[in-house]
Image (cartoon, coloured by chain):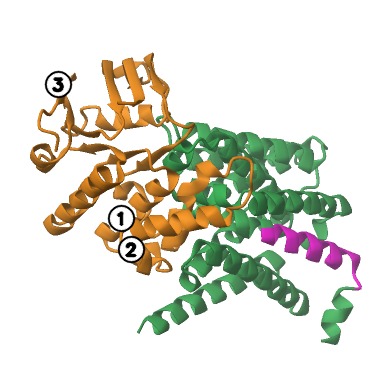
Amino acid sequence: MNEILTMFSYGFIVRAFVSGLLISLCASLLGVTLVLRNNAMISDGLSHVSFGAFAIAAVFGLTPLYVAIPAAIIASIMILRLNEGKLHGDSAIAILSSSALAIGVTAISIGSGVNVDLNAYLFGSILSISQSDMIVSIIVCAIVMALYVFSYNRIFALTFDRDFAKSTGMKTDRYDLILAALASVVIVMGMRMMGALLISSLTIFPTITSRYLAHSYKGVICTSVVVSLICFVIGLVLSYVYSLPTGAMIVIVNLIVLLCAMLFSTISKK
Amino acid sequence: MKTLVEVKNLCLGYEGKEVIHNLSFQIEEHDFIIVLGANGSGKSTLVKGLLKLIKPMHGEVIYHLQKDMIGYMPQVTKVDGHFPATVFEVVLSGALNRLKKRAFFRSGEKKLAMESLEMLNIADLKNHPFSDLSGGQKQKVLLARALCATRELLILDEPSNNLDLKSKAEFYDLIKELNEKRGITIMLITHDEHGKESLGNKILSFDDHEVTCTRREANA
């Protein structure tokens, strides 16, 4: 217990805790929409694009967020547009992901004089979370929360049956765009802590877990948020106490919770 | 008789390629229109056009209904059968067009959803997970959602798909009842010949890009 209390005497842990908690919350909400619309891999694609953008920003000495946020938003719009054409779904995302990774890695090796911590980009580092990251996280979280509270019924209709929602006069294209843009920003923010390779787990795991535990849409949303927050806190504390990588610990805790949920669901059905 | 929808010289298609050419017909109050045709003949394109999911390439659709007051029931297979939602959540989402600028449903809309469930005798399924239902029950839930959107005009896309013979007959009886007893205008899209003999007062038939609209003399 003492160890946990002293943990919060470090400024970087407090920043990581606040940003991480808010980003986990946003990721779990947006994750429900992405997963239930069978778009789970979009977050994976966006994380690779963000990696490319971070790498380019580092090589050119730019502020990473200023490059990564617009790049991820543009990528998310491209994925939405590509979905309507010949190149769609998984293949569009795969092409975008690998291209962005390749560009990022090339940029890093061209600028080899620049000190770039590739490991931190790929697997995250809580040391990299700055004061301004924390402020952006708070703003993004406020927007995502407001959207999910005030457009709850519209987002449900859109997620369940887009054509029906559109036939009632709902501006579905506008909502798609807003949700994709917010998902991109959340992925970029979460990448600091989780890394490009692990961030998509924050959007996917909580939803999958909650599907084993809840049967209503409201239930899945609430369970997903709770699961996401609990896993984040446990993961962060374990990583501090045992000096293990934070992103990886959060994913492992999420995995254990998912396995427990699957077991619980199987037992309760018998 | 009041005209609800006028379709005038309508051409619909995708990427510049016409699927429906110069189609004109009217939907009048209390009509029961059967839209018949093989797969790929353009029936679903017509539905998309009527619902304003795609823009006409030429011609127009004029609505004499309250704005966005069309109850649409998609093919059951178009909806994710494993989606985590209760029956009530699905049906209530039909009232989306009544929200206007509001964020939340009021008691009036919840009552409407409950009435729609009762109308189709599935009120007992209210709190059941949608994913646990049979094909026929899912079909009824989607119909209840459409009834929640409007009591004026329902557009039903291939409701008999994936139903066994008994559920199919039951479903057709139900729609017939909605049309005859509640005066709800129905447009039913099907490739199932079963409907041709027993249902409808108008038949819109899609054959080799020729669309013919015939009126049945003895009103069904």
Callout 2, which amino acid? Ile
Question: Residue B122: which numbered mark, if any?
Answer: 2
The residue labelled by disc 3 is B208
Given the image, what chain letter belongs to the residue carrying mark 3? B
Q: Nearer the viewer, mark 3 or mark 2?
A: 2
**Whether label 2 touches label 1, CB < 8 Å:** yes
Query: Dot 2: few (<14), some (14–19), or many (≥20) neighbours within 10 Å?
Result: some
Viewer-closest of B145 and A94: B145
Q: Which residues are magenta?
A: A9-25
Disc on the earlier residue, 2 or 1: 2
Who's the residue at 69% across and 37% down the image?
A: A107
Q: Mark 2 belongs to which subunit?
A: B
Q: Quadrant of residue A76?
A: top right
Task: Identify which amino acid the numbered label 3 is placed on.
Answer: Asp
Residue B97 on the magenta span: no
**Residue placed under numbered mark 1 in the picture:** B140
Q: Dot 1: within a 10 Å radius of its alpha carbon, few (fewer than 14), some, or many (20 or more) residues?
A: many
Disc 1 or disc 3, which is closer to the eye? 1
Image position, residue B141 (x, y; %): 35, 56
Marks 1 and 3, Cα distance to the nearest angstrom? Answer: 32 Å
Q: Which mark is residue A164?
A: none
Residue B29 or residue B210, whichever sits in front: B29
Q: Which chain does orange denote in the image?
A: B
Distance (Cα) linking label 2 and label 1: 8 Å
Dominant secondary structure of the magenta stretch?
helix
Amino acid tagged 1: Lys
Number of the front mark, 2 or 1: 2
The location of residue A49, given as percent across then percent down, is: 62, 42
Give the letter of the chain under mark 1. B
Q: Earlier in the sequence, mark 3 or mark 2?
A: 2
